Amino acid sequence: MFSHVDAIAGQLGRGLLLTLAMSALTFTGAVAGGLVVAVLRICPVAPLRAFGAGYVTVFRNIPLLVLLVLFVFGLPDLGLLYPLFATVTTAMALYWAAFVCEVVRSGVRAVPRGQAEAARALGLGFGQCLRHVILPQAVRPMVQPLGSIFIGCALSTSLAAAVGVAELTGQAEFLTLRYDQPLTSFALTTVVYVALTLTSGLVAGRLERKLAVVR
Amino acid sequence: MKPVTTARRDDIHLLFDPPGPRARRRIRIATAVSLAVFAALLAFAVRQFAAHGQFDADQWRMFGEWPIIRFLLSGLGQTLLVTAVAAALAFPLGGLVALGRLARNRPTRALARTYVELFRSVPLLLLLYVFLFGLPGVGLTFPVFWQLVIPIVLGNAAVVAEIFRAGVLSLPRGQTEAAYSLGMTHRQTMACVVVPQALRAVSPALVSQLVRLLKDSTLGYVVSYLELLHQAKVLGEYYHAVLSTYLVAAACFIAVNSALSGAASWLEARRA
């Protein structure tokens, strides 16, 4: 039952690299996009606020797999053809940006109002107030949920297998069909995913303690 | 001035003072510019749709025909069925696991914890593949409905367990202490004091979990279970109208899930 372990491990290693790359790109894109959407949602311009709210409603409530098939099989029908990896990663980043936006908003809301009022009373401008007073305090409560979002991103990259990307889960499926040793490849893959999520959880915990603000 | 009630207004008032005349003018200009940008984006989208024949009648006509609507509705029905059955199994199982994590005996706690860590770390699709390709290899086969539902239940029970546990831990400690000082046993304390209050506290989170369950049901696409996304795929390929069909399916998913999310925030607001 364990005869092709080398070949299996090699394939899974390639899958893992792809999973890691996708997770990192998805997460980076989601944080960038989420920040933008969060800013839109709290800016004083009504149409932008409405757009932000609509974005969050749509992308939080659409199943990721639906978004993926829309992007992968639907966009080419509009003449928008991109490489598969880029398409899938973009769709996932757009999806997770909605969740990041909500994390950012709740982080900002966790800062007591008096802090912003005091900063303004001291004559700080909007940028200074944000940079020196609000953001440093808003970041701490965001670390743990952002860690969960990273784990969510990493796990959701598995859905790329369903639209034909040979990342970790895709490799596990392929190896199962090829070597007919489902339990070996699935067990190895599971170990890799568990290691990935446990590490991310630990890192998030460390970061959170490091950034702790005494209030 | 209108009363400040919604959370959105709160955000604005945390960061900004009420705008003065110059700021109001800037806001008006930004409003006009953003509307113009949205109009341009919309025009681009419409042009792309039109240029590639996506507005042609044969891309959309079938959605007016009753058999097609019925076909999609049956997919939606199956989606809701999978969600309901998975919830009916995952919620109690998650509750049990949470009780295991809060149990006083160490092996039970360790076992429950392992379950949670394992099933929260494994992507659902991998779990699905185990049931689709792995278990048949060792002689275990399930009907396609259960091939879809069992992985969803296993994965979501771990999440639900953490929701329940958070609910129990959020209760003031005095509740448990009072129950013990009344002479209740651990079991009585759990059953009469802790669990009822925790259930009430986590009910909004459980309703939002339904959104996640419903999203997970789209994995039926992979096992060819006849839920909404799979029906959309079949329909889109048959009529060569992939984009319009997936868009209709996406709209259905968003409508149902927004309703569920709305119910969750309503519960949350009522509880507070």
Image: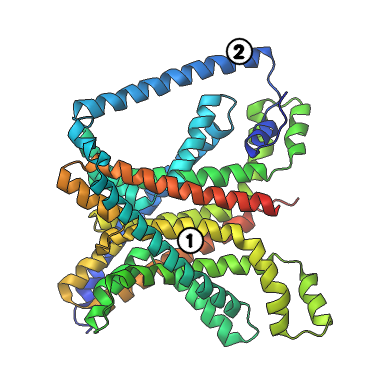
B247 with respect to A8 (left or right): right
B235 with respect to A30 (left or right): left
Residues beneath discs 2 and 1 located on the same chain = no
Q: Amino acid at mark 1?
A: Ser
| Residue depicted at 42% across the width and 54% down the height | A153
| Residue depicted at 48% across the width and 41% down the height | A56
Judge depth for marks 2 and 1 and give the one in front: 2
Q: CA distance from mark 2 to mark 1?
A: 46 Å
Q: Position of residue A172 (x, y in %)?
A: 26, 68
A193 with respect to B59 (left or right): right
Image quarter where the N terminus of chain A lies is bottom left
- The chain holding disc 2 is B
Identify the secondary structure beneath mark 2. Answer: helix
A144 up-or-down from B193: above or below: above
Q: Quadrant of residue A131?
A: top right
| Residue depicted at 58% across the width and 18% down the height | B27
| Residue depicted at 56% across the width and 15% down the height | B28
Q: Position of residue B241 (x, y in %)?
A: 20, 41
- The chain holding disc 1 is A
Q: Residues within 10 Å of mark 1 (few under 14, many from 20)?
A: some
Q: What's the mark number on residue B25?
A: 2
Residue A86 visible in the snapshot: no
B163 up-or-down from B57: above or below: below
B35 up-or-down from A54: above or below: above
Q: Position of residue B57 (x, y in %)?
A: 20, 31
User: Circle 1 sits on which residue?
Assistant: A200
Q: Amino acid at mark 2?
A: Arg
